[in-house]
Amino acid sequence: MYPLFIDTIPRRNETPDLSGSISQSGRGRMGSCPGVRVAGTGSYVPDLVVTNEDLASLGCDSDWIVQRTGIRERRVASPDQATSDLAYEAIVRCLRQSGTDARDVDLLICATMTPDFATPSTACLLQQRLGCIAPAFDVNAACAGFMVAFITAAQYVRTGLAKNAIVVGSEVMSRTVDRTDIKTYPLFGDGAGAVLLQPSATADGESGILSFTLGSEGNAEALCIPGGGSREPISQSMLDQSRQFLKMDGRSVFIWAVRVVEDSIRDVLTAANVKPSEISAIILHQANIRIIDAAIKSLDVPKDRVFVNLDRYGNTSAASIPLVLDDAYQQGAIHKGDLVLLCGFGAGLTWGTSLIRW
């Protein structure tokens, strides 16, 4: 009855062209999910602040980091904190802000690429800690993970299978990067952000998720952690080569990201018959300020409608969109009836973009 969308899978051995527009084989599928509202937001970041200057001893250049990425500092989890700890704090704040009891949560989806354990899921740990009785599972779509989890949860709410769905993006990215990789190590930080989805009073197409697109264009080599999985189990040789850390072809990913952000945003705006000037808040994945600036230029919207906390938190992967969303909401920048655009993109390569009537 209601649309669930799976992207077209490229043929085996077909390599996507990352330097041009999104190929048709990898273009996302469109949909909408009216009648679902964001009823609450919450976020949490660890106390430890690591500035660019703090990384100078590793050979990292502060000016280079700022000029190439826009990042000035990031948060790092303490040794006794794991992904579920950050997520729990964000969820508690979200529930408190919305006035919802944790026992009423009936769906819990955690977007993360840094789970506490390979199994069980981080979501199950959170479900136990919150004391709710609910389906709980993780989604791993890297930096696009929150968007995939968000749209998935919205379908549950839209079809009546959930009334209080928690979607949390939480990452401890500082433990996925190699301190000797001075071009990648400074980019990432730790944090968590959560939203509560509930049915809205109306399902007339004028509220909720007006349009969305989800897609993937497989290119594992562009951005991946090669070691530690079933393809390359943990071994001394793997550890000696530092293959347990994130590897990234930064230039290719950057070119692809700029294209996918521009194209996917235009797709959802066209589907909803909305002009860029009508958007009240634009929340993009916080990967690189140059990608964000390119999107602003492409859309021709006022800069003050694009919210950025990349300079303070770095790239927090699946946590970045809900972190910025909570920041914007707490600042009073988002009001009932506003049009809010969310866009995430990352390893896979994957993306998700949605337009919401708040």
Image: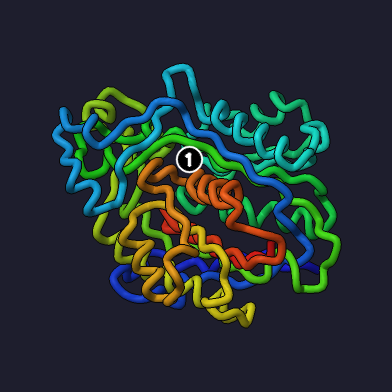
Q: Is residue 210 visible?
A: yes
- Residue identified by numbered label 1: 113
Residue 315's place in the image compared with 256, above or below, is above
Q: Position of residue 261 (x, y in %)?
A: 43, 67
Q: Position of residue 52 (x, y in %)?
A: 25, 37
Residue 326's place in the image compared with 115, above or below, is below
The front one of 247 and 64 is 64
Residue 257 placement, left or right of 202: left
Residue 238 placement, left or right of 25: left
Name the quarter where the C terminus is drawn. bottom right
Q: Position of residue 188 (x, y in %)?
A: 35, 40
Q: Position of residue 230 (x, y in %)?
A: 43, 36
Query: What residue is rendered at 62% in x and 82% in y?
Result: 273
Query: What residue is rendered at 71% in x and 30% in y?
Result: 127
Residue 75's place in the image compared with 1, above or below, is above
Task: Say which amino acid is labelled 1.
Answer: Met
Query: What residue is rendered at 23% in x and 46% in y?
Result: 65
Residue 352 placement, left or right of 288: right
Q: Is residue 352 visible?
A: no
The image quadrant that residue 166 belongs to is: top right
Q: How many residues crowd around disc 1 within 10 Å: few (fewer than 14), some, or many (20 or more)?
A: many
The image quadrant that residue 238 belongs to is: top left
Q: Determine the residue located farthest toward the top in the rendered image.
A: 80
